[in-house]
Image (cartoon, rainbow, N blue to C red):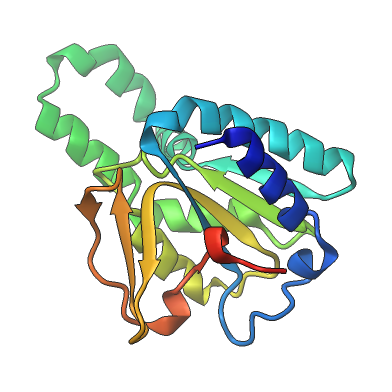
């Protein structure tokens, strides 16, 4: 993967007035997936940070959200994070995983926090990272399905370390790290647009 080429392509796409105005989406939600090689996680994370700065410098109002940070914020707000960090060595791995799963539950915790973070305050674009960091306690397809009813008012781009494919009969498939498949997403309104194939 050439991250410079990816950054340039994303900058051209994400700064385009037509993209920011969500032109051509018809009835589909303005959620986009940008896949990348999981081995390039650190490079892509730095690239997204630089891309966000560059977009802001051109006047695009955007938010950058890390999903794992949201989970930690949720745990901190409920006064669980400090206990976990202090006593982690005494916890069973299963207990740690269960705690993380509880506080990343899409219905009661993470998705409401994510929707609040995305907001409806004049933001033009939201970039979401951390899909790999929240596995296995939350999968990206769950986020896609949960965001669909949120009536998003600007484009949301999810960076995904793996593969994303749409099949001819209307379903979608995410493969985290290129090998861990998610359940098939059948509802066409849950189908995020693959930025690898997006044309202005």
Q: How many marks?
A: 0
From the viewer's side, name the closer residue of 6 and 90. Answer: 6
Say whether residue 50 is left or right of residue 46: right
Judge whether 45 appears above or below 104 on screen.
Answer: above
Q: Residue at x 76, y 52 (%)?
A: 12
Quadrant of the image occupied by residue 119: bottom right
Say whether residue 54 is left or right of residue 170: right
Quadrant of the image occupied by residue 122: bottom right
x then y, percent, for residue 104: 35, 47
Residue 107 seen anywhere in this rendered image of the structure? no
Q: Residue at x 37, y 36 (%)?
A: 38
Judge whether 192 appears above or below 99 on screen.
Answer: below
Say whether residue 103 is left or right of residue 87: right
x then y, percent, for residue 177: 30, 43
From the viewer's side, name the closer residue of 175 and 30. Answer: 175
Q: Residue at x 14, y 21 (%)?
A: 91
x then y, percent, for residue 190: 43, 75
x then y, percent, for residue 157: 58, 55
Residue 11 seen anywhere in this rendered image of the structure? yes
Say whether residue 142 is left or right of residue 93: right
- Which corner quadrant holds the C terminus? bottom right
């Amino acid at each position: 993967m050439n991250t410079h080429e990816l950054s340039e392509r994303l900058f051209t796409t994400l700064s385009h007035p037509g993209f920011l105005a969500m032109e051509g989406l018809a009835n589909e939600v303005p959620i986009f997936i940008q896949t990348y090689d999981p081995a390039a996680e650190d490079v892509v994370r730095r690239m997204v940070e630089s891309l966000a700065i560059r977009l802001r410098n051109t006047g695009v109002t955007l938010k950058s959200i890390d999903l794992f940070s949201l989970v930690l914020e949720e745990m901190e707000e409920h006064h669980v994070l400090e206990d976990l960090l202090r006593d982690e060595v005494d916890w069973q791995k299963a207990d740690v995983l269960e705690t993380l799963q509880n506080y990343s539950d899409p219905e009661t915790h993470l998705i409401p926090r994510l929707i609040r973070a995305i907001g409806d305050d004049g933001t033009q674009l939201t970039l979401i990272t951390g899909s790999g960091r929240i596995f296995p306690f939350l999968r990206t397809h769950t986020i896609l399905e949960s965001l669909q009813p949120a009536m998003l008012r600007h484009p949301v781009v999810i960076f995904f370390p793996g593969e994303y494919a749409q099949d001819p009969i209307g379903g979608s498939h995410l493969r985290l790290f290129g090998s861990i498949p998610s359940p098939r997403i059948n509802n066409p309104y849950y189908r995020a647009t693959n930025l690898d194939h997006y044309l202005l």
